[in-house]
Amino acid sequence: MKTTLDLNDDLLATAKAAAAMQRTSLTRLIEEGLRLRLASHGAGRSVGPVCLPVFEGRDGLVPGVDPLSNRSLLEALGDDA
């Protein structure tokens, strides 16, 4: 696929020189760089299920706090909110 890139002049000159020294094309050099960068960030890797920690609390809420009421929860927080 053809595309147009807007590259920094110094970066392009360095890349062209590196490609020439490696006896490869600028396209191949850019493709290799993209593959390495994407692989290092886990692009394309499937992520399995995430196991979240669950707090097995004791005692529950303070008596009088309705867990279904935002107002009740905010009042219970008091100045901590």
Image: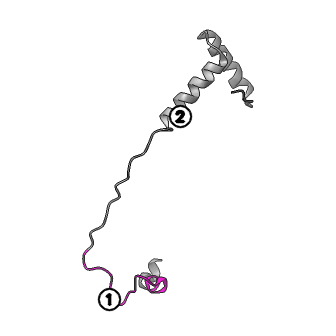
Secondary structure, mark 1, is loop
- Image location (x, y in percent) of residue 80: 44, 77
Q: CA distance from mark 2 to mark 1?
A: 52 Å
Dividing the image into 4 quarters, which one contains the N terminus? top right
- The residue at 52%/28% (across/down) is 36
- Image location (x, y in percent) of residue 24: 61, 12
The disc placed on residue 75 is none
Answer above or below: position of 3 versus 55: above
Q: Residues within 10 Å of mark 2 (few under 14, many from 20)?
A: few
Secondary structure, mark 2, is helix
- Residues 72 and 79: in front is 72
Q: Which residue is mark 2?
A: 38
Answer above or below: position of 69 versus 23: below
- Taken as a whole, is the magenta stretch helix, strand or loop? loop
Residue type at mark 1: give it.
Pro
- Image location (x, y in percent) of residue 72: 44, 86
Q: Quadrant of residue 8?
A: top right
Q: Earlier in the sequence, mark 2 or mark 1?
A: 2
**Residue sitting at the far left:** 58
Q: Quadrant of residue 31?
A: top right
- Residues 19 and 51: in front is 51
Residue type at mark 2: give it.
Leu
- The residue at 46%/81% (across/down) is 79
Q: Residues within 10 Å of mark 1 (few under 14, many from 20)?
A: few
Magenta stretch, residue numbers = 58-75
Q: Which residue is mark 1?
A: 63
Q: Was residue 5 drawn as part of the magenta stretch in this picture? A: no
